[in-house]
Amino acid sequence: MHTPRLRSSRRTFLALIGASLVAGPTLAAGSASAAPTGLDDAAKKEIAMKLVSSAENSSLDWRAQYGYIEDIGDGRGYTAGIIGFCSGTGDMLDLVELYTRRKPDNALAGYLPALRGVDGTDSHEGLDPGYPDAWRQASQDQAFEQAQNDERDRVYFNPAVQQGKADGIGTLGQFAYYDAVVMHGNGGDSTSFGSIRGLALERARPPARGGDEVTYLDAFLDARVWAMKQEAAHEDTSRVDTAQRVFLRNGNLNLDPPLDWQVYGNSFHIG
């Protein structure tokens, strides 16, 4: 993966989901059973997965990443899977616990004590040398793929889309939220998703509060770029500048194909 992501506050993010993620307007009761609109439409979600994968793995083939694992030197231990679950930030531990509840006899179950021990650190203690091979072995199991999908949705995708809908923004805006949550997490630090959104709200009103969608998304992307530049590892902001901002400038608030963008100098196309 190209850049380390800020994941230090994901435990806080889980707590927020359990309480009340959205500030301001919320979805009506029973809306979860309504027909998908926005980024949670199946075709749009597929586009979202490809867009994130283009930035994280220089590939549109996001399904090829279930078995991905390496330490990218960002201080968060191993990074792995379709969303970059990290051994040092808790979300990898949550994933393996879920997988083990569903399938106790799996290649990763024996590493749970070690994962609990390294949570919050960049340590590999108890994981080396066998953990990467065990991860790749587990990735051949459809149950592990499903666990990755479910944790991605529970922790990142669904909350980002829910907040986007509550703010009255469309598919592109919901994707901008999702990509920010993937990279920055949503804790209490100044570069978390919640803080990025807070900066945007200081500068513009979202449609749910009577504002203009393009103006608000410009403010959100400005805040996102600022947050990325707070760490040297995020100085390349092309996943915003030559991707999301391009779609916004083209007025493509619905993320309708064809889509052409660049990330880290690589060109991508969805027809």
Image (tube, grey):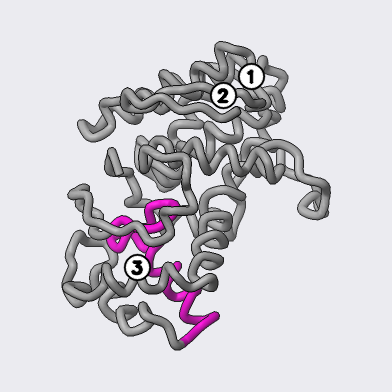
8 or 64, which is in the foreground? 64
Picture layout, residue 94 above or below residue 22: below
Mark closest to the chain's N terminus, 2 or 3: 3
Quarter in which the N terminus is drawn: top left
Contact between labelled residues 2 and 1, with CB atoms less than 8 Å apart:
yes
Which residue is pictured at 20% across the width and 52% down the height? 75
Q: How crowded is mark 1: few (under 14 residues within 10 Å), some or many (20 or more)?
A: some
Q: What element carries label 1?
A: loop
What is the number of the mark on residue 38?
Answer: none
Residue at 57% of width from left, 43% of height from top? 160
Label 1 or label 2, whichever comes before in sequence order:
1
**What label does residue 136 carry, if any?**
3
Give yes or no for residue 137 being in the magenta stretch. no
Amino acid at the residue labelled 2: Leu
Question: Percent position (x, y) of residue 16?
Answer: 53, 54
Which residue bears the numbered disc 2? 259
CA separation in Å, label 1 and label 3: 38 Å
Amino acid type for the residue under numbered disc 3: Arg
Quadrant assignment, res 92: bottom left
Which residue is at 17% across, 65% downward?
A: 123
Residue where numbered disc 1 is placed = 252
